[in-house]
Image: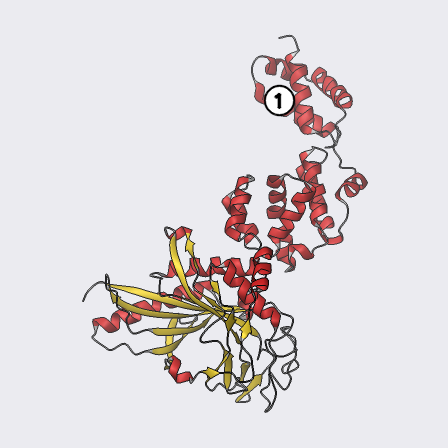
Amino acid sequence: MPVMESVIGLEIHAQLKTATKLFCSCPTSVGSEPNSHICEVCSGQPGALPRLNAKAVELAAWTGLALGSKINNFSIFSRKNYFYPDLPNGFQISQLTPPICEGGGFTLPESENKFIRLNRIHLEDDAGKCIHDKQRGLTLVDLNRAGTPLIEIVTEPDFRSPAEVVEFLKKLHTILVHLKVTEGRLEEGEFRCDINISLRPKGSEDLGIRSEIKNLNSFRHVSQAIKYEVIRQERQYERSEPIIQETRLFDPVRQETRALRSKEEAHDYRYFPQPDLPSVPVSPATLARLKSELPCLPEETTMVLLSLGLTREQVAIIQNRRGAIEYFEAAKSFFDEPKQLATLMLELLLPAALREDIYPLETKCTPKLLAVLAKLITDNTLSRRAAYNLFPEIFEHGTDPKELAELRGVLQVSDAGAIKALAVDLIKAHPNEAKKYCNGQEKILSFFVGRLMQQSQGAANPKLAGEILVRLLKSQPK
């Protein structure tokens, strides 16, 4: 048997961040009572006419611009005919030819800068949700999600390993969340993918018979599913068993894929233009406006943050938390010390926000308050230890750091005269230790700094105290 290689392509679905559904005015909010956000359009009532959400069109075009796609001036919606119990129309409204975006792609830095090509990006509406009640032996249908706007991003079959796929998905997720195209909550299915996998002899250009693994919304499960499916197909080749083109599901408990149904081709869906919707225009003026509003992409932001002195680990943590980049930039506008701000965000703000399951931008500790706290530390007005002790109250109540430090009496004393008086008395009280310092035992300086901080009840500026002690000790007779 020849050495085989895997050929993998992806179909990624991302729920667009709009207030209403794709073809009606029902809200897209999650967690509501079943079937409480439906109308005659999204519940598939006869004679109900869809009306396109213009915001969804702009978000799809914006995504295409960010990913280097060609934006078509006109695209059309089609009916994709198939039966699901939670698909009330009996068809999905999607785009076949032409879609709103074509082409594009980006590189994978950790995979030797391999470029992954995109085939297309198109708009479509989501289906509802089946809820299986095993106790009563019933399957219930919730149509709250029906009609929710999606973009489907289809790649070329350019992947050869699970690592490449996971790197691509993580980078794409970061881009889409950064652009605020989607909330990207994986646990809610707002970012999920289908994986097409086939094997072929290494070096061949032919494509093998593929299996499709549906609806994965975990990066870990994506990797596990690909590894299992590659081994399964390899074993079938070894046994000379035919590979069947089929759709499969991944079982995360058993970590295996299982057959669901035979794989459909485009002609099986009997696509035809949706007669109730006109073509979708994206005018040159709209395209120019969207280009002008496009923010720096995460890769560009990474280079900016690295140039400011942050480490790659710090940058990765900040970028992977929704809202953190905007928070950081806002704080930097009040106090331009990025390293200090990043440290406070990583060690205090983000862990606190994670514990409370909230985004940094929604905390009472505003960017300005964090900037004030960073400045107090940098100016040696407040010790780092005192600042960290004060932070929980700042985070919970939005208290001004300086006012709180004054109230608690923890502002550092930077009065050189007062510190010098303490240092003089300290050296007089410990002549033997002073003599040792003068004879070259410089490590004993920490003894004097510690005692001085103790006598000042932690209020003395330790840096200034150290400088004054060094001058006084060096002036002592040996």
Q: Residue at x 49, y 85 (%)?
A: 84
Quadrant in the picture for residue 407: top right
Q: Is residue 414 left or right of residue 113?
A: right
Q: Position of residue 130 (x, y in %)?
A: 53, 82
Residue that protrudes farthest toward the front in the picture: 284
199 in relation to 422, above or below: below
Residue 348 in sight here = no
112 in relation to 413, above or below: below
Q: Residue at x 77, y 45 (%)?
A: 400
Q: How many marks?
A: 1
Residue that protrudes farthest toward the top in the picture: 477
Q: Position of residue 393 (x, y in %)?
A: 74, 49
Q: Nearer the viewer, residue 101 or 324?
A: 101
Q: Secondary structure at mark 1?
A: helix
Residue 287 in sight here = yes
Quadrant in the picture for residue 47: bottom right
Q: Nearer the viewer, residue 189 or 210?
A: 210
Amino acid carrying label 1: it is Leu
Quadrant in the picture for residue 288: bottom right
Instruction: Give the quadrant of the N terminus.
Output: bottom left
Q: Residue at x 64, y 58 (%)?
A: 359
User: Which residue is denoted by mark 1 in the rendering?
Assistant: 445
Colour theme: secondary structure
